[in-house]
Amino acid sequence: MVATQIDAATIRRVRAQLIGDVDLAGRALARRLSQIADSWLESLAAGLPAGWALVATGGYAGALLCPGSDIDVVLLHPPKEKEAAVRDVAEKLWYPMWDAGIKLSPSAHTVKSMLQLAADDLDTATTILRLRTLAGDPTLAHQLQTGGLEQWRRKPFVWLQRMHEAGQVRWTKCGDVASRLEPDLKDGRGGLRDYDTIRWALALDRPEITEALELPFEDLAGPADVLLAARCELHRVTGRFANTLLLQDQDLVAENMGFADADALMLNLAGAAHSVEWATDRFWRRIDRLQRRVSKGGGQSHHLPDEVPGVIVVDGEVQLTADADVDEQSFVFRAAAAAAHAGYPIGPRSLRLLASRGPQAGEPWTERTRRAFVSLLGSGPTLVSAVEALERYDLFSRYLPEWRHVRSLPQRNAFHTYTVDRHLLQTVANCAEFLRVVARPDLLLVGAMLHDIGKGHPGDHTEVGIQLVDTIAPRMGFESDDVRVIRSLVEHHLLLAETATRRDLSDPRTAAIVAEAVLDTSTLELLVALTEADSRATGPSAWSNWKADLIIELANAVAEDLRGELRLSEPRVATDRFHALMSQVNADDALHIEHEPSGDFDVLRIVSRDRRGLFAVIAGTLALHSLDVVGASALTDPAGLAVDEFRILRSSGRETNWAKVEHDLRSALAGDLDIDARLEQRIKAYGRTHKRAMAAAEARLEVLVSNDASDVTTVIEVRAPDGLAVLYRLSHALSLAGVDIRSAKVATLGHEVVDVFYVSSPADGGKIPAAGHEAMRDQLRVALAD
């Protein structure tokens, strides 16, 4: 074989110029990248011997390549060719591309060996459904593709089942493109892989499978192009070949694609992904139905368990009969609720009929409508898909017009996982497990549905939400007392979580403040359930056993206050879990440390005689070891024992050297380790190499100082962008200011931290005079200045 020599540097230069051409984007860029790859491989393979061929497979066979796409090729060679000869030819083809940094994914086979592999391997079987000859004998690619299609069509339902199972694994891992704030554009549900999967299924060329797709396959080309363009731009602007569109990259991708902002980009992507997702879900549901018919027979109709006149189930889908009273106001919710509770989807023909008839948008509800709506909300895990199906035809927002504003609304906050609408639905679905333990499950479900309904409007989303509730709840037919409770759930949906993680729960004033807001134990009961459901729907870092324990502790204290039960007037020190350490300190007057795993956290406990700056030294030592403190408490008992507990998020793949942590802590306390100097170097390096988690708005530095939040101490709350050693810098500044840290709380909210300190004057142990608050604010701002 005599191949045309191509210089790796030339390949890199030409490819970089192509990717850097701002006039090329989306499909045009993907097409040009494929064409230039064709030219390189054609040149390298120009001298292939007779009976050989170089063939493009997979996505590359479709002549579209994103900047980070794998270039899938197979070298087809004669059956009896010696292995050394095959290796020699292959290396002349592969190495120039690899030397240029090209993501080439090659293989070498005979037609027979490739077909043998494809007979049982799903990835190979789908790869050869579309082939394109780059060089050599084109009949080999024809033989391979023809043989692959024959094998594919020989056992259609086996391949379909395996494709569906593979898709379900992907969806579980990657989530939905439309509802994720950081979507996987390729492998997420509704992404490019689902588009390809439908194309592979249609290659079976069976009428019943083709008919399972409710729309022409060509109608999905537009949505797929939107996803392709975003993936191309993501690869181009980041230089990374990942497929997840991270928050930190969305602004630049949006700008380069010509969108007004990242929110506009994400709304556009959500619309495209919804189209692919809807077609995919309906397709696989119908394929499953076909398989059931083949194995068991089918086609018979029956009523739903919760029978609704005019509604039947046919082939696993809810259908409407001719006598269905679709113009009756409650019918949509009654049918949807019965279907969701039974686990059946409503068929598209029935959805179209419901969309073409029915009540006017926004009219007052009857009691029957409200009850049916609450029943739908209580359907649990099936709620999300049920509401999304209704909303595809604008049926849900016909009854709740305010829903249109939050539909597919991005939050662009690293603390959240989902768009606003999906977060609300997931919160309601999570509430299903509390329906038997609260006195008013209907108010819990509606409060959960509306708790973030004010997002996306100008101003504070809670205040806007309260105003919207005053319109929505009466329209739903709730009486004034119930409207007040729903309003309270919306107003205070963050109260328990924020108080439990940011306030000293041993201070009686903490529970009293919450009790003044909640007013009664029945509302408190609903808020406890809503808090857990909301937190679990927010993201993986928003709920833990630790947070659950804090919520329970706070709720119990608030309930005591509401019942008028006496509490201690002085903050209590929780000594149970520190008893052994405190006894050791009392015995030998030394510092004692212990640590233990607790779920996703490591808990570090330290007890010693109190001293000025102790908390800051501990925080600095932990920062020096790059330990991620997500919660901390610091208490001093009447005998002068300092009790500190830090909750540290455990890093995957890295074990903490606790012996080294303890050694450095003792060295720092002894003055042998300069925490300031060591951290200063690390902070500078961190700023150069780390990007902060993103939010819709950059986290601001805010310092609040109050003498009203506690009866005996001054409370300082600092909100700041997340970064290295924030807790240390703040606590060190307080130490330099000459105040005593009586207790502290630390909360990390994705892109920002909220550190709360309960401090007192060393002179009299009381509150810091108001005259000194402004100076303290300035000192803390300076401590965090970049």
Image (cartoon, rainbow, N blue to C red):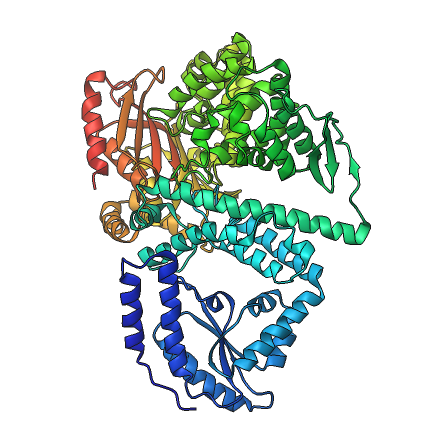
Q: Is residue 632 above or below residue 466?
A: below
> Looking at the image, how many numbered discs can be counted on the residues?
0
* Foreground residue among 587 and 42: 42
Q: Position of residue 202 (x, y in %)?
A: 61, 59
Vertical relation: 244 (above or below) 324:
below
Quadrant location, the N terminus:
bottom left
At x 36%, y 26%, the residue is 457
Q: Residue at x 65, y 62 (%)?
A: 204
Question: Is residue 299 something that shows in the picture?
Answer: yes
Q: Is residue 102 visible?
A: no
Q: State left or right for residue 548 relative to residue 8.
A: right
Residue at (62% x, 74% y) in the render: 146
Q: Quadrant of residue 327?
A: top right
Q: Work out whether residue 781 or residue 585 is closer to the camera in this orientation and state it.
A: 781
Image quadrant in which the C terminus is located: top left
Position of residue 356 relative to residue 676, above or below, is above
User: Residue 19's x, y, as percent?
Assistant: 31, 63
